[in-house]
Amino acid sequence: MSYDMIAILMFSSMMLMLLTGQRVFGAIGFVAVIAAFLLWGDRGGYDIGFSAAMKLMKWYPLLTLPMFIFMGYVLSESKIADDLYRMFHVWMGGLSGGLAIGTIGLMVLISAMNGLSVAGMAIGATIALPELLKRGYDKRMVTGVIQAGSSLGILVPPSVVLVLYAMIARQPVGQLWLAGVIPGLMMAGMFVLYIAIRCRINPALGPVLPKEERDLPMGEKLALLRAGALPLIIFAAMMVPFINGWTSLVESSAIGALAAFLAAILKRRMTWTVFETSVRKTLGITCMFMWIILAALAFGAVFDGLGAVKAIENVFTEKLGLSPWMILILMQLSFILMGTFLDDTAMLVIVAPLYVPLVGALGFDLIWYGVLYTITTQIAYMTPPFGYNLFLMRAMAPPEIRLRDIYRSIVPFVLVMALALALVMVFPQIALWLPESVYNK
Amino acid sequence: MRITRRYIRTVDGLNRVIGRIVMFGIFVMMGILLWSSVSKTFFLPSLWTLEMAQFAMVTYYMLGGPYSIQMGSNVRMDLLYGEWSDRRKAQVDALTVFFLIVYLGFLLWGGIGSTIYSFQYGGERSPTAWRPYLWPIKVIMCLGISLMLLQAISELLKDILRLKGEDIPHEVDA
Amino acid sequence: APALAQSTIRWRMQTYAGPALAEHVIDPAIEMFNQIAGDRMQIELFYADQLVPTGELFQALQRGTIDAVQSDDDSMASPTEVTVFGGYFPFGSRYSLDVPVLFNQYGLDEIWKEEYAKVGVQHISAGAWDPCHFATKDPIRSLADLQGKRVFTFPTAGRFLSQFGVVPVTLPWEDIEVAVQTGELDGIAWSGITEDYTVGWADVTNYFLTNNISGAWIGHFFANQERWNEVPEDLKTLFKVCCEQSHYYRQWWYWGGEAALRVNGPKMELTSIPDAEWDTVERAAQAFWDEIAAESETKAKVVEIFKQYNADMQKAGRPYRYTNA
Ligand code: NA
Ligand code: NA
């Protein structure tokens, strides 16, 4: 059998095994070790799985993973975002759709304090969702806002997805993070614009808050703004030493985790339950990530051994004779398609090692592609049938919100994200301007 | 039947205790990395911090893995799975858990080989300036993988009991 | 993949180098081998950490997961008595031609073959690479500037350099460029300037120190013993010839590249530590050699050869050596 055939067989049997609903890492790892054994078993092919574990140990940027996950859980479990929400509530409540717009603002600030989307989802679903529903906001608008807003967690630095991408593409994390800032803010702005326009056309979607609820004395209103300082302090504590080169990436992530932890203690929110839950869930999610990456590394080593990357490159460039841009667009489309039914972590570690070298070989900037890649991952994260946001939403939303509502609610936001993706593709400077001006001093 | 239940109780109990100790490893990693930035700023950078943090991370996810299975943290693709009844899930899981068992078996096979190597030739050392011996971390990895295997078998037994109509509580949500 | 006859011998070989460097240090030799051997034997080449991580490379070679390896002894942590001399043995050689002379005329080749036979690995051929220089973000103009610098280097070189306050860091080779950018490293002491430019390190560092701690890296080709024994004699010869070709390519590629990039390279500023001050380091190397020699009989034998060789070169005078020290 030719190597191309084996590669295709491996990929399709992995997809098949994933469909059985067994734990993702088990399905991927199984295909990897069996393939390695069948291919090279006569000469020690049994050790590829464990080799991957030794390789993983040396991937030092992954140390940021538990730190950012812990940060996210401390923020969401301790509810120190309550004050932030109140701030937006009072200041934005006077606008039609203002609470939804405020929720996007909240999500941007939370994104700046953690590396995943899960924390934003949890905070949005527990704090913002009930309030918005109580104020008569349209349920589809509400769930869409929270899911879309939380997806910013992986685009606005710090971002775990960009750390993983950096490992695979061998690009500097600092530049990638900075490249995510403006596209992230731009996308948040586009969400706001969409909400404002929709609510202007149909004010019933986002009623104005009653005057007495937001009519505080000016002094108190200003005092609320102080809540906004917290995320800025945590963000700065982590990013300033890192961008200046005083601390390394992994050290900065520990500083960020410590800052979030101290903030929760100082605000007297760090009860035993909050502490225990954050610590336990951090272990759970970190293990989930690490075991998937471990299995995917073994899969990747076998795939690499078969020369699968070269085979894919050949198909695209020689057999199909496509131009680099055509290939890029085709890749993004297939990525979104796979993302609809693949978990985003699995997709990252399986698909990225195949696509990233190809993108580099085609002559595209890999920092810029990192941003495209992340936005695509965001879209994949949002779209059914597979996505944490959907599970979480289903688990956290009140019964009057049905699955159909959750699915339907994301449609306009995914379209906005696709538009943002197109903008960054056409105007690379949206992503590249900031890292270029900071690092090319 | 009684042996089955005792196995499940013992393995789940053991892995739960280990997991609940290891979960505080987050602070070990945080401490090492913070010390790394402090020592770099005020004294000479430490030789051992990055590697030690890596060892801590490996211990964390390897020994914590079985508890994460108990908590149900390991995602599944639920395109079809999500729609199935509990009975159907148990039926399919009882079969597909062998993917997991085979994968873990291969991991252990490679791990034991690598661990034996780490004891040979006067002890394998990491090729860094700190030069720590590698057998302790490899032993921990083998232990973690073995515990994962025991947990996977426990999951299988639980599914079998469920199929026999017993009421076994599901993975607690994490 | 090309259709191959059933009887084709297939080898998997992994190099320590990433793709950019491999384009010069190994790709041409393997392509040549495959072209000539044709249907009889094909070698598939993998780059740094691709199939197995560098730390597991030696075991994988012993076990046969990988059939052949291109690496130095030191970074692949081979469990032999000669490991410390691979890579950069501090001040062991001054020019890249020293290495083949040491192996072919001063007896190192026999010692290496013997040591690797003990651990079930065929040592095929030793060759020279580039000299070892510092490439750093901040300039090094005196020994004091070395204090606290976190530098990616070889284990043995790191052990030697730590007495000058250097903090040696070992990371996967492919991650170095990013590690400099993420602040995990302040610099690199791994290669000459040719490699700094070729693999992209010149893009992330600003200064190149012209003083070197060794004139040439020692690296080798190895094969799994059983696999080597299975190969017919003429193909063994062909493989050795291709190794020699690879050594020859590197001789002129590095030698010319070092000079050209020092003179014309736009990305790195050159700095130097004055000779009188650098002499401290050279003298420290003598003590380090004695320290190594005391570790075992084999090591003492190798150190003796290095001493003899350098003494001979000194006596021979110009162009072999230009100083009297
Ligand atoms: Na973020
Ligand atoms: Na999805």
Image: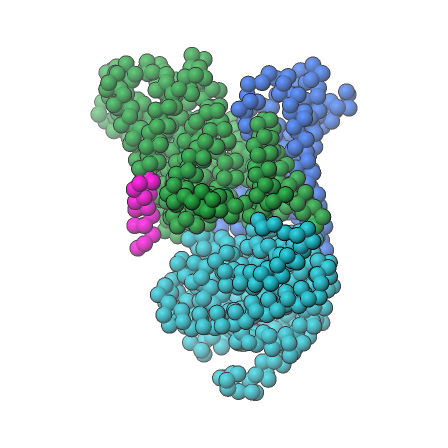
Chain colours: A green, B blue, C cyan
Quarter residue C115 falls in:
bottom right
A236 displayed left or right of A59: left
Q: Is residue A8 visible?
A: yes
Q: Nearer the viewer, residue A284 or A275?
A: A284
User: Is residue A439 highlighted in magenta?
Assistant: yes
Q: Position of residue A236 (x, y in %)?
A: 36, 42
Q: Quadrant of the C terminus of chain B?
A: top right
**Residue placed farthest to the left in the image?**
A218
> How many numbered circles does the render carry?
0
Q: Residue at x 53, y 83 (%)?
A: C320
Where's residue C92, x and y in %?
Answer: 57, 74
Q: Can you give x and y, in whole percent of width and height, for residue C135 in the image?
A: 44, 64
Quadrant (top left/top right/bottom left/bottom right) for the N terminus of chain B: top right
What type of secondary structure mainly makes up the magenta span?
A: helix
- Seen in the picture, residue A253 relative to C96 is either above or below; the reply is above
Kindly tell me whether residue B64 is visible in this rendering: no
Identify the residue at horizontal 59%, vertical 37% (top origin).
Answer: A9
Q: Residue at x 72, y 68 (%)?
A: C114
Q: Is residue A92 magenta?
A: no
- The residue lying toward the viewer, choosing from B125 and C98, is C98
Residue drawn at (50%, 31%) of the image: A343
The relative height of residue A49 versus residue C199 in the rendered view (above or below) is above
* Residue A397 drawn above or below residue A371: above
Task: Give the image location of residue B25, x and y in percent.
Answer: 56, 39
Q: Quadrant of residue A19?
A: top right
Magenta segment? A424-441
For the residue pair C26 and A348, the one nearer the viewer reads as C26
Q: Nearer the viewer, residue C167 or C151?
A: C151
Q: Quick check: C218 left or right of C144?
A: right
Q: Quadrant of residue C116?
A: bottom right
